[in-house]
Image (cartoon, rainbow, N blue to C red):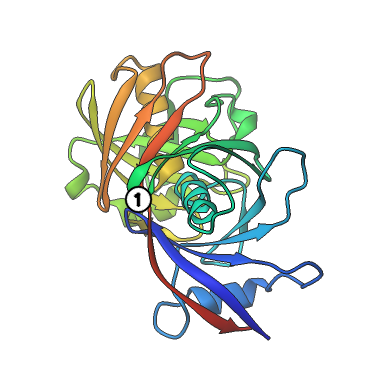
Amino acid sequence: MLLEFTKMHGLGNDFVVIEMPAGLQLPSGDTWRQLADRHTGIGFDQALVLEPARQPNTSVFYRIFNADGGEVEQCGNGARCIAAYLHRKGRVTAGSIAMDSPAGLVTARVFEAGVVAVDMGLPNFEPSALPFAAPMSAATYELALGGGESVTIGAVSMGNPHAVLQVDDVATAPVTRLGAAIEQHERFARRVNVGFMEVVSREHIRLRVFERGAGETLACGTGACAAVAVARRRNQVDSLVQVDLPGGRLEVSWPSPTEHIWLKGPTAVSFTGTVAL
């Protein structure tokens, strides 16, 4: 059958948005991998599957599938694109939107020109939230990678697991090598997203992210929130931080440890089409 899709991106972190008709079986992991191929498929970092709302006063329930076919819990840029998609379709008006996901409820705010902010909830530093094998919560952990090499990381859940490494220069950081090694590390039972963070000032960081199941992406919303949360826990940044990623700039606001963290940035539609499943 033919299924309509919309290709979207948030700073180059790209998605295919599909509204799944009721009763239709979800694509298999192998099908997602074929669709994600940038030469023979549509090409995307994640697929965003929209289903009818499951809770009152919400607009949609969404699920997220990585390019490798695996389902994940949350995606900040994906949530922003879904809110922009619903607004573009006339399903919601500008302002606040409530959405539901496997990671829980997400509130979004739609502004002008495709700019969307999403409430990413409270960062959770408990190792069990990722999950991550550690005896207790700490600001830093030593992670042995084999061959005598080790790295220092921060670990936090933003509804999905993140490890954050602070580096002197993101441009020269060994993102592919270390990202792949840390993503698959045995201490992360469900694998992990890996952020490489350069703190420029108290209001500005640079970041590259090796995403679980997708490799390095041009931007990562939950990765931006995770990096700010880790840096703020160490008192390295203030409450409002500009996060520069290869695809552009996001804004992360975290007023205090007891308040929710917000992610804001642009979204865009690349093209629409149909695909045969």
Q: At x 73% / y 55%, what residue is drawn?
A: 52
Residue at screen point 23% across, 47% down: 173
Is residue 179 depicted above or below 42 in this figure? above
Say left or right for 155 vs 237. right
Q: Quadrant of residue 227?
A: top left
* Identity of the residue drawn at 18% across and 49% down: 172
Where on the picture, by quarter, is residue 151? top left
Please give left or right for residue 223 compared with residue 251 in the image.
right
Q: Nearer the viewer, residue 52 or 236?
A: 52
Give amino acid for label 1.
Ala
Residue 131 at least partly seen = no
Estimate how packed mark 1 is, as few (under 14), some (14 to 19) or many (20 or more) residues with alpha carbons within 10 Å: many
Secondary structure under tag 1 reads loop
Q: Quadrant of the N terminus?
A: bottom right
Residue 167: x and y, percent? 25, 36
Task: Return the residue nearer the eye: 129 or 146.
Answer: 129
- Taking 117 as reference, is 236 above or below it? above
Q: Which residue position is annotated with label 1?
A: 219
For the point 18% across and 48% down, which residue is it? 171
Assign the C terminus to one quadrant of the image.
Answer: bottom right
Query: Measured along the vertical axis of the image, is residue 45 above or below residue 114?
Result: below
Residue 268 placement (x, y as % from top left): 37, 58
- Residue 242 picture location, percent across and down: 26, 32
